[in-house]
Image (cartoon, rainbow, N blue to C red):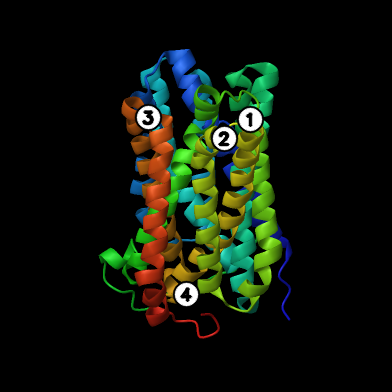
């Protein structure tokens, strides 16, 4: 059997972890920063946060085209350099308008970089281990999305300095760029008789329903990652639990690799996706129901809230750890080999749309109805995503699957 953990694959995973860690180090704390430092209202916070996703969304289709057309290593390094440079903007932005501008424009190189890095990861994997390898690759950004906020929250509690967080994020991004610079990417044969320019060069039309399903799950994580800290502080009265929450979420992600690796090796993608969605739904539902359950219990209310709060983190992490690599593999399996970049960008475009809608919609709902209503919206959207998968998306994938070794 071909070696999965080759040197280049380990490097691209490490770089992926660092770029997501740099981004998510201070993301959950941004609502607090914007509120306390600039006096921004909840709906303004939502607009500032969603701007990042909008520019990321705009750049994803073009980045998929570029990594499929030009030398991937060159595209990767240019994207990483621009992504890293934007962290200097956070350090120098002195007004809400300047910060919003930097944050919004930063989405462009982030969107392009994540597409380029994930496509390079596929290139350095042996074909016989690709399904399993993509699953582990997805774990690197999932872990960063969980561990980085934990670290960021603890650093902020100790230092109360956002400037320190911005500096640490900049250093992480620089390290990731250096690691990616040492990767050897195999030369691709020149594509003869290139197809004419069409929408399918920028968005994988064969995978549109998979992408639509991912929008729902991106929405849920967009609300959670952006408003957890301020919801915990203002609604639940937790001032120091956010870091532990994301740490437990990371624990769930790691458990998902132990419990889901075998089914990925066997090509049971639809099974992993279904299990992940259902587990996440239980986690989100538990999260929003815990105050109500505590009131009904009357006794040991605080204990029940703590169990529900931290238990939901473990379940959401476990669910996302199953779901994300399954959906990434399914999207790649419906794409021809010369559209791997487009397949990756399509999945990430969908996630960006969901994240952006979650950040913006969560802020608007919270401004008018409160943070509890914003998280109830998460549950309803998650239910819609699960129903869509079982009713339509699963059969959609099986009809278009180009890889006979997966199902």
Q: Secondary structure at mark 4?
A: helix
Query: Label 4 crowding class (10 Å Cα cut-off): few <14, some 14-19, many 20+?
Result: many
Asked whether disc 1 touches disc 2, contact meaning CB atoms under 8 Å apart, the reply is yes
- Which-is-in-front pick, marks 3 and 1? 1
User: Of 44 and 394, which appears nearest the observer?
Assistant: 394
Do callouts 4 and 2 mark residues in contact (Cβ within 8 Å)? no
Q: CA distance from mark 4 to mark 1?
A: 47 Å
Residue sitting at 48 percent across and 35 percent down?
226
Query: x and y percent of residue 335 in the render?
Result: 42, 73
Residue at 38%, 28% in the rendered image? 370
Q: Which mark is residue 333?
A: 4
Please say if the residues under marks 3 and 1 sit with CB atoms less than 8 Å apart: no
Q: Which residue is mark 2?
A: 294
Dot 3 and dot 4 residues touching (CB under 8 Å): no
Disc 1 secondary structure class: helix
Q: Judge whether 356 appears above or below 192 on screen.
A: above
């Amino acid at each position: 059997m071909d070696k999965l953990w080759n040197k280049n694959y380990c490097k691209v995973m490490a770089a992926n972890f660092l770029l997501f860690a740099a981004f998510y180090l201070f993301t959950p704390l941004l609502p607090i920063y914007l509120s306390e430092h600039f006096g921004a209202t909840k709906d303004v916070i939502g607009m500032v946060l969603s701007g990042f996703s909008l520019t990321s969304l705009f750049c994803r289709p073009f980045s998929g085209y570029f990594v499929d057309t030009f030398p991937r290593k060159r595209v990767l390094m240019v994207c990483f350099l621009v992504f890293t440079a934007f962290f200097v903007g956070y350090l120098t932005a002195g007004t809400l308008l300047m910060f919003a501008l930097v944050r919004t424009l930063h989405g462009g190189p982030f969107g392009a970089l994540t597409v380029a890095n994930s496509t390079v990861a596929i290139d350095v994997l042996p074909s016989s281990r690709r399904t399993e390898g993509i699953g582990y690759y997805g774990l690197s950004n999932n872990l960063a999305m969980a561990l980085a906020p934990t670290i960021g929250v603890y650093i902020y509690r100790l230092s109360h300095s956002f400037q320190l967080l911005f500096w640490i994020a900049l250093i992480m991004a620089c390290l990731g760029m250096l690691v990616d610079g040492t990767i050897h990417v195999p030369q691709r044969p020149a594509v003869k008789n290139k197809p004419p320019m069409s929408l399918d060069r920028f968005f994988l039309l064969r995978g549109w329903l998979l992408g639509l399903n991912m929008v729902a799950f991106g929405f849920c994580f967009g609300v959670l990652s952006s408003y957890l800290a301020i919801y915990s502080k203002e609604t639940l009265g937790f001032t120091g639990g956010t870091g532990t929450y994301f740490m437990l979420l990371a624990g769930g992600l790691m458990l998902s690799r132990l419990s889901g690796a075998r089914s990925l090796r066997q090509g049971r993608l639809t099974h992993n996706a279904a299990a992940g969605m259902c587990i996440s739904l239980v986690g989100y539902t538990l999260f929003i129901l815990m105050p109500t359950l505590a009131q009904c219990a009357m006794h040991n209310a605080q204990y029940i809230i703590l169990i529900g709060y931290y238990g939901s983190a473990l379940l959401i992490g476990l669910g996302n750890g199953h779901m994300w690599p399954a959906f990434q593999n399914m999207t790649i399996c419906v794409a021809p080999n010369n559209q791997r970049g487009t397949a990756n960008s399509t999945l990430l475009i969908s996630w960006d749309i969901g994240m952006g809608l979650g950040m913006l919609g969560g802020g608007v709902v919270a401004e008018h109805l409160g943070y509890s209503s914003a998280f109830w919206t998460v549950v309803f959207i998650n239910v819609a995503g699960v129903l869509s998968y079982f009713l339509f998306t699963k059969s959609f994938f099986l009809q278009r699957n180009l890889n006979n070794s997966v199902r």
